[in-house]
Image (spheres, rainbow, N blue to C red):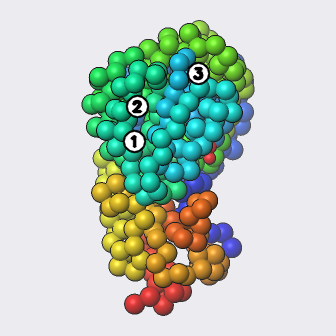
Amino acid sequence: MRKKLFIPGPTEVAPDVLQKMATPMIGHRSKDASNLQREITEKLRKVMYTQNPILLSTTSGSGLMEGSIRSLTAKRAVVFSVGAFGDRWFKMAEANGVPADKHSAELGKPTTPEVVDQYLSTGKYDVFTITHNETSTGIMHDLQPFAELKKKYPDVYWLVDTVSSLSGVKIDVDALGIDVCITSTQKALALPPGMSIASVTMRSLEHAKTVKNRGLYLDLVDLYSYIEKKDHQYPSTPSLSHMFALNYQLDRILAEGLDNRYKRHFEMAEYTRAWAKKYFALFPVEKFSSQTLTTITNTRNISVGDLNSALGKVGLQISNGYGDLKEKTFRIAHMGELTMSDIQEVTSAIEKILQLK
Ligand SMILES: *Cc1c(COP(=O)(O)O)cnc(C)c1O
């Protein structure tokens, strides 16, 4: 049986969007390919509230996370981790020989601007990274305090992972002054996995030119050079299928209206949080709980694996905890195409299976 996905990626894809993946191929050096990239750029600029260049990479979200930390770190990067995806960014730095330090918050707690200030005030760093929405712990940051802080450090570049939040909550890239804002197709944007997306400031691209050994496939400077000099094309063959679907899905998103989309996500999050508090407990501190997924503490000591098997029999799937949080927590995603009635369907199915009262 096909299962409706309440996992934090891949998420449900609308049938007509899925159909667009089957669009017949065009040459990737054709005018049509340039136009496709240009249209996607214009629409993504609206969704990201930015005038910056938009880069697409045929990789999952991790691709441009790795590419950006490697391309932009000339001195040293500091990664502020609040869970598994922050840790991954640090591992990427290490694996690429990029000098980096990591600061980890206690699981379920956010990164604070005070801690970031402590690190940046040493003058050792030219890059810092923030996970906007940590998909393991369900922490979502307010980016405004970091934006304020960053004004004190004009020579530092700010990289933000919005992989599991962009388009589910407003990320005002230019107003916040985010240098590289990264997302991918299979979370709140509700497309199949396979493309990484980033907005990049011109000043970061200039800075990146001073960095040695940026690699090639994920080098932001090389990716941008083809947009600029080759009329919105790519150094290598992009997943045109994703581009057709993305272009179409962005129309759907803009037709829904961004504010309506954020409101839908907010309402689903409020509902799921209230449900979680009634029957279990929230894992992240409530003030920083995510608008696109809820991480729930398994206070009843249920078998999450068994629950998910039972849900599978009625065509639903949630997510176990991530890594060390497996069985200790479970996660219900409420992003992308999902609506309030979907969330009510999955929560009442859980109530029935566990006989919750
Ligand atoms: C899913 C996710 C990633 C990694 O994305 P992939 O597309 O699987 O490479 C990175 N950061 C966050 C917060 C995520 O949720």
Q: Which residue is mark 1?
A: 254
Foreground pick, 95 / 178: 95
Which residue corresponds to mark 3?
71
Which label number is shown at residue 303? Answer: none
Is 71 displayed left or right of 48 in the figure? right
Q: Position of residue 314 (x, y in %)?
A: 60, 79
In space, the residues marked 3 and 1 are separated at their CA atoms by 32 Å
Q: Amino acid at mark 3?
A: Ser
Q: CB of mark 3 within 8 Å of CB of mark 1?
A: no
Number of residues whose C-alpha sits closer than 10 Å to that of mark 2, classed few (under 14), some (14–19) or many (20 or more): some
Rendered-image quadrant of the C terminus:
bottom left
* Point 29% across, 23% down: residue: 151
Q: Is residue 313 above or below residue 258?
A: below
Q: Is residue 55 left or right of residue 111?
A: right
Between disc 3 and disc 1, whose residue precedes? 3
- Residue corresponding to mark 2: 119
Amino acid of disc 2: Tyr
Q: Position of residue 280 (x, y in %)?
A: 42, 77
